[in-house]
Image (cartoon, rainbow, N blue to C red):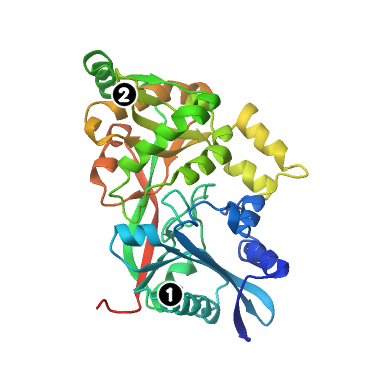
Amino acid sequence: MGKVTVEKVTTKQQMHDFIHVVDIIYRDCPQYVPEFESAMYELFKVRTISGLEFSDIQTFVAYRDGEPAGRVVGIINRKANKKWKAKNARFSMIEFIDDMDVSKALLDTMVSWAEENDMDAVIGPMGITDFDKEGMLVEDFDLTGSINTVYNPDYYPRHMEALGFVKEVDWLQVHIDIPKEVPARYARVAQYAREQIGLRVIKVTNKQIRESYGQKIFDLLNICYTHIFGFSELSPKQVDEFVKKYIDLIDKKLMPVVVNDKDEVVGVAITMGSLTKAMQKSKGKLFPFGWFHFLKALKWKPDDNAEMLLVAVHPEYQGLGVNAMFFDDLIPIYNRYGFKWAETGPQLEDNVRELSQWKPLHPSFVKRRRCYKKIIKLKD
């Protein structure tokens, strides 16, 4: 099939090949949603990436007969490894043509890099943080992806398994059709939470988020996600980066924050109108005309679905109606916006409490994604 080589990304040409190898792989794939090209270039300006104070990162690009054929990013998150008492090297952003020599060369390179750094295992796809894209799609390849999740061809899992990688965990996404009215159960429980517990929904402004609520919200996320697979607490630098990069994209009407009678943040749901079609039309580029598609989706004519990026409830308030307050607030707004359906971000398949909250909305579970693992050295 031709000579295959894997190179560390050190030159502008290699950087270009790393970013644009997806143009080859997804040329005729209507389900694929591209990355922001500008964000991809930021990956190579390592001084700008938060999380590097506790992580090492290395990018690789694969060539077959001199032509770009695949890529992978290696990550060692020392904070996560310390927390979980592990020595894992993570791989992320992996892509490859349907050529076993290419996928093998990429993953062999990852294993070698992990061994050089005294790691015991290679796992992925996972990013530096739990808010990066993670998991390889193993089902529902006919469904369109989104800007916050991984999409990949159906041959990827076959390659992973042939190369000795096995399942570590799976994530599912929850798909719901937006009801015309708030289900009675949610309305009743939300009213109880307001009247008997003293909880209320507020909508915060960009200024409030930058000045105080951004840190409060991410402090809550650090508490709520602490026991989630692979999670490591976000540093203040990471919080600042998330706020600066993404807060202006979020319509605050679609982001209910629940506070108690002391004005403490006890719950947050971060949702937004889908930008999938805008991203596909712009091909991930804001200029020269991509900005128009994003502005249209954000301000004038959004897609007909919402993306429920994350939901977090303080452990002391779980089971006290906070989730019902989210739905009680969002369902009427979704209807005013014309959203017909919504999907969550990936949720661990064994997180029964999280998955069961959707039952009154008659959910379907779609787009199974997998974190693979390969042990490369037995623990002493």
- Residue placed under numbered mark 2 in the picture: 183
Q: Amino acid at mark 1?
A: Asn
Q: Nearer the viewer, residue 164 or 263?
A: 263
Calculate the distance from the C-alpha at mark 1 to the C-alpha at mark 2.
53 Å
Image quarter (top left, top right, bottom left or bottom right) of the N terminus: bottom right
**1 left or right, relative to 170:** right
What kind of residue is marked 2? Answer: Pro
State the residue in front, 248 or 86: 86
Query: The residue tagged with tag 2: helix, strand or loop?
Result: loop
Q: Which quadrant would the C terminus be assigned to in this image?
A: bottom left
Q: Position of residue 148 (x, y in %)?
A: 50, 47
Residue at 54% across, 27% down: 206
Residue at image coords 52%, 30%: 210
Residue 240: percent from left, percent from top: 51, 40
Q: Secondary structure at mark 1?
A: loop
Other-residue count near label 1 (Cα within 10 Å), few / some / many at <14 / 14–19 / ≥20: some
Quadrant of res 191: top left
Depicted 87 relative to depicted 223: above or below: below
Give left or right: position of 272 versus 181: right
Q: Which disc is residue 117 wearing?
A: 1
